[in-house]
Image (cartoon, coloured by chain):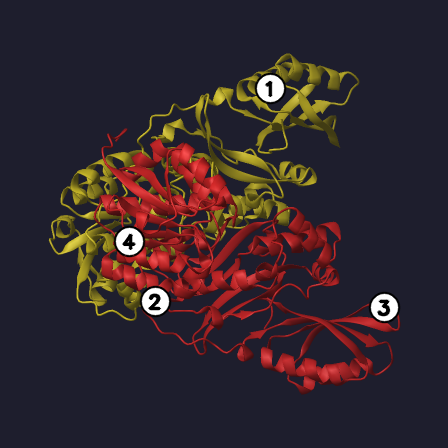
Chain colours: A yellow, B red
Amino acid sequence: MYKKRIDTTINVGLLGAGTIGRGVINLLRENALTIAQKAGTHIKLKTVLEKDPILVKELTDEGYIVTQEINDIIKDPEISIVVELIGRVEPARSFMAKAIENGKHVITANKDVIAVHGHELLEMAALKHADVMFEASVGGGIPIIRPLKQCLAGNNIQAVMGIVNGTTNYMLGRMIEENLDYDSALKESQEKGYAEKDPTADVGGMDAARKIAILASIAFNTRVALEDVFVEGIQTVALQDIKYAAELGYAVKLLAIAKYLPEHGIDVRVHPTFLPEDHPLANVKGVFNAVFITGDYVGDVMFYGQGAGRRATASAVCGDIIDVARNIVNAGSGRILCTCFDEKPICSHDIVETPFYTRMLVTDKPGVLAAIAAAFGNNGVSLRTVLQKSTIGAYAELVVITHKVCYKNLSQAIQSLKDLPAVAKICTAIRVEDNKFA
Amino acid sequence: MYKKRIDTTINVGLLGAGTIGRGVINLLRENALTIAQKAGTHIKLKTVLEKDPILVKELTDEGYIVTQEINDIIKDPEISIVVELIGRVEPARSFMAKAIENGKHVITANKDVIAVHGHELLEMAALKHADVMFEASVGGGIPIIRPLKQCLAGNNIQAVMGIVNGTTNYMLGRMIEENLDYDSALKESQEKGYAEKDPTADVGGMDAARKIAILASIAFNTRVALEDVFVEGIQTVALQDIKYAAELGYAVKLLAIAKYLPEHGIDVRVHPTFLPEDHPLANVKGVFNAVFITGDYVGDVMFYGQGAGRRATASAVCGDIIDVARNIVNAGSGRILCTCFDEKPICSHDIVETPFYTRMLVTDKPGVLAAIAAAFGNNGVSLRTVLQKSTIGAYAELVVITHKVCYKNLSQAIQSLKDLPAVAKICTAIRVEDNKFA
């Protein structure tokens, strides 16, 4: 089946020609011939919504229609596919909603909108037999949404664990590789353009929280809202913690985790995590992302690649464009929309059980260890490892790893520890993800 | 969009209820409710082609129609989807062809048929607007065919590298972990059921060759035939080689590689490979598989998981079943079939350039090294590393790593070395995959 004669054209309207938008424009142009063969139709970018005067001139020179009026795209009967790459919630959400109302298929890379309003858009699309695709909203160029919705559809998914924020993964890596403290690692990431001037969404975990809300909704066939996600950032992770982790055979990663606990519901959270160094996710370095999925039949699978960037994200967006075009050509639009047919409860974070690593400063006197052990034990927390590390001034640094304990008990134990005169400071408490722990 | 009322049923006919077949039967039954919601229709296994009397009784007891007559399935107007899990080429190929002729959609896990006859089946399916899906034919449960055909469709793929044979990956791992020689590792794999009694297809590389022929055809949009693949097995890899590799910072893996060289065509091969230990594929342990893909936009992505086994393979087959069912429900069948719209040449293996590792036994006398270096140099092979290792009897073991050299020159150099009186034996020559080499 060699080269086909292609005599139809599907027109695309693009909202926003910033970083990712430019990637999509370039890809559609550079790879136009192979894309037409794969889609069975030419795919032509017709109109771009953009107001930045430099970009407007650039795009006009390249022969695209440029507009500042959304109706020029969503009311244009020649345009079938609207690609939203404006970012943030508004006006992106309203534009997508209007596009669907007007019978357009919609593709977006917008995790902010999909995490919060995805179900609304998908429900609107169902009424119109329109496609809504958002492969680029999680994991940049990594195929992950479509594999979950299609390839793994036979499975009951048990867990999803991901490194879905490149900035923090880069920072944590640089800390251990270059002996940097948190602030230096952040500064370096900002200088390299990996972290934004206001890095809160990345380091605070909200970026990862949006992505795991999206993945968990798909994995468990139920709506997981952003506010369902328990979130802790990496701001409290110190260089010492990463060094102790390495000593104990762990890498420290900001993980986004969603597990289905049949008796309790969905456990969904983002936090720094001690991960055994032989876990496939522990070897994900630099700004790379990876998502590790466990299903009842497939077992463990992992998807790895660039989680951000112009070209990688454009790859995901264009994969969606080609798929939507194939649906148009074959009259199969709307074949996969909302898969949240279930209503599973969300599990309270208080009852989620993990082992914990805790580092604290204590006075170096006889009886102190016994008092600390008692504070843990009285709150139902049993200890697996206790290490006395370096002496810092008048204090000894104590590193503890607990057995599996529910968060509520750990919180209470930490409160009791804080009340002990011998405990000067609880420096960090970091969850451990390790199947070897009972 | 909560639970839907499902009032249609799509019937499936299954050819072969062996290992994978049983996995599919179980999965379809256990996860029936969620599958119906995802597919938008009930999916019911109606009839099974099977002659093993024990299985026939089992299946009959479970309520399935069991037959030894293929027409009972492919002529049954109630059956829309035929799942082929007989294995080998015939009668599997003919059965699938007849099923398509009779308007059935076909799903298979059969790499033997797809690698050699896939294009014929896809062309027949195109005429009938039928689906032919074969996600399970490469990488077992790992989503790889669909991500390549859909998610990465915007890319020009530059390279595909995979660990696609679990048996050999397990054996190579056990050799270094447990200090086993090749024969002991093979014996252990056979005892554990990872290797067959006749292990030739696995250790000789033909299993991997079939899989890379399939992947390369999809990746490069052109037909790559099985006989286009240059194949070397792992039989010549000795424990020493793996140890020296580790010493030099490499893991030894049986890699299936396909690269597009714009000036020469498609370079496609299977052979043991020295891979830098920080490469994501180097960390793929045990019977796990992984496929590493490089595209012009997406950069590097990797897909990792179980490449074989009843449950993992059933996951892939059922993902296909659900997808085919969605196409039937949405009248979009046949939307993605053969993507070989290009006719790219296959590059002769003689001109493929890689660095080589070579281990040889030489007499331990002055002047020998100079003679060896000359034998390489006279054939245009320049050396990057020369290590004299242990003395074995009257001989010294010499380990050499070359710069990038084309296979033809390396072969000639090895011939010249064999003619040297000082060279007692060329033990192994293994390709090195390392971007650090010029």
Q: Which residue is mark 3?
A: B392
Tell me where residue B239 appears, x and y as whole percent.
73, 60
Instruction: In the rendered structure, find residue A414 and report the number of the disc placed on it.
Output: 1
- Examine the rendering and report whether any part of residue B6 can be seen: yes
Q: How would you rate the neighbour count of disc 4 (Cα within 10 Å): few for under 14, some for 14-19, many for 20 or more?
A: many
Chain bearing tag 4 is: A
- Asked whether the beta carbons under mark 1 and mark 2 sit within 8 Å of each other, the answer is no
Judged by depth in the image, the label closer to the viewer, 4 or 1, is 4
Instruction: In the rendered structure, find residue B340 and report the number of the disc placed on it.
Output: 2
Q: Are marks 3 and 1 on the same chain?
A: no
Marks 3 and 2, Cα distance to the nearest angstrom? 53 Å
Extreme top residue here? A378
Marks 3 and 1, Cα distance to the nearest angstrom? 62 Å
Judged by depth in the image, the label closer to the viewer, 3 or 4, is 3
At label 1, which amino acid type do we have? Ile
**What kind of element bears circle 2?**
loop
Residue in the foreground of this view, choosing between B424 and A424: B424
Chain bearing tag 2 is: B
Corner quadrant of residue A435: top right
**Residue found 27% across the figure and 35% down from its top:** A119
Chain bearing tag 1 is: A
Tell me where residue A41 appears, x and y as whole percent.
22, 62
Marks 3 and 4, Cα distance to the nearest angstrom? 61 Å
Corner quadrant of residue B390: bottom right
**Residue found 43% across the figure and 48% down from its top:** B16
Residue in the foreground of this view, choosing between B301 and B5: B5
Judged by depth in the image, the label closer to the viewer, 1 or 2, is 2
Q: Which residue is mark 4?
A: A323
Residue A190, compared with residue B399, is above or below; it is above
